[in-house]
Image (cartoon, rainbow, N blue to C red):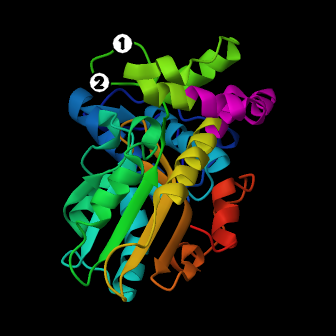
Amino acid sequence: MFRSMSSRSFGKSKPSTPTKPEEDRKELVFNDEAAFDAACRDLKSSLKKSGSLDMSHIVKVLHNKKDVHDLIEEHFPGAMTGADILAKVAPVIEKYGLTDDNTLFAQSCCPDEINHEDGDTPDLFAKHLGEVFHMGGLAGIPFTGKTGFAAFSHHVPEEGHAFIFMAPHIGLSESNKLGKYSRIGQSEEGGACGAVVGALNHCMCNKPLPDFAEAGDDAQMCYIIHQINKNKERILAEKEKSENAMQAMAARVAHDVGRDMLNRICTMDFGDDNTQLMVLTGIQINMPKPFDGFFQPITFHIRNKKGEVKDLFQEAFGGEVRRGFQPSISTRHLNAGAF
């Protein structure tokens, strides 16, 4: 809990100002370490630049970071930093015998550079599990397809296992707009994921759908436009709530599209009798600085050579973070025992 204390300042001394009446003091309660950590980083940077901080600025920064956290919790319940995700998943990985020596790690993430920064979820998992096979294209969809999975699976160590991390991404700008991101060196906010936002704009303008036969050099974007168009009503229904709600749903649709493709291309035609395949999917959230990147887990399961599928979600995360999502085709596949 933090209480604002009038215009008190920290750092170099400044002339004192009258203390506000007791009834004007505001109480601010923090319950998220990531938001508080981001606020502390911001304030430390400001103090270093200016030499002092007044209480009104401190309270403003604290409120801002809490607003960011509340926005993420509203649209992506259960999202947390990559470090927190790994801390919850690592014991489960170890329990089922997967190590950096016997496991090959694959990630299906959008190639956008903001998804591969130091400390992001894909980066942390790569450091934990070792070498990376890249399966993803635009929007994190595993566009390497069946051939890509076959290549990946046949690189798995003898008597070893495989782990796949699949996630589309969505940006959150400094002005708290989902689907936007404030990139270093650019004065204006840009789209993130640009492919998903671009596909949604294409469909909202009722432009003709691109022809797969003529897609040629832009086949991935053609596929994404068609998939977004199939789910256009589901996405646009959220616009009545807010623009942020609509962009969040577009990211959820991108997740379902990617997860469903993963269902179609993955097999257990590799390894030996004890080989296992562990899969974690969700949505990567590119947070405004100085926040660390967030990730919302959606599915987490393991499959063995007998065709048995075990849902590991509650074991790792201790609850049902899928709330707020319509049942996806991928979830129905999992519950039915299909890949």
Query: Could you tell me residue 274's position as x and y percent?
Result: 36, 88
Query: Farthest residue toward the front?
Result: 213
Residue 117: x and y in percent read 27, 43
Which residue is label 2 attached to?
184
- The amino acid beneath tag 2 is Ile
Is 268 situated left or right of 159 in this image? right
Residue nearest the observer in this picture, 72 or 29: 72
Q: Is residue 218 above or below residue 267?
A: above
Q: Which mark is residue 74?
A: none
Q: Which residues are magenta?
A: 225-249
Q: Main secondary structure of the magenta part?
A: helix
Name the residue type under label 1: Ser
Q: Residue at x 40, y 25 (%)?
A: 182
In this picture, residue 148 sits left or right of residue 128: right
Q: Residue 187's mark?
A: 1
Q: Which of these two is toward me, 14 or 287?
A: 287
Q: Residue at coordinates 63% horizontally, 42% vertically from top-left?
A: 253
Q: Distance from label 2 to label 1 (Cα)? A: 8 Å
Residue 73: x, y in percent? 62, 50
Residue 178 seen in render: no
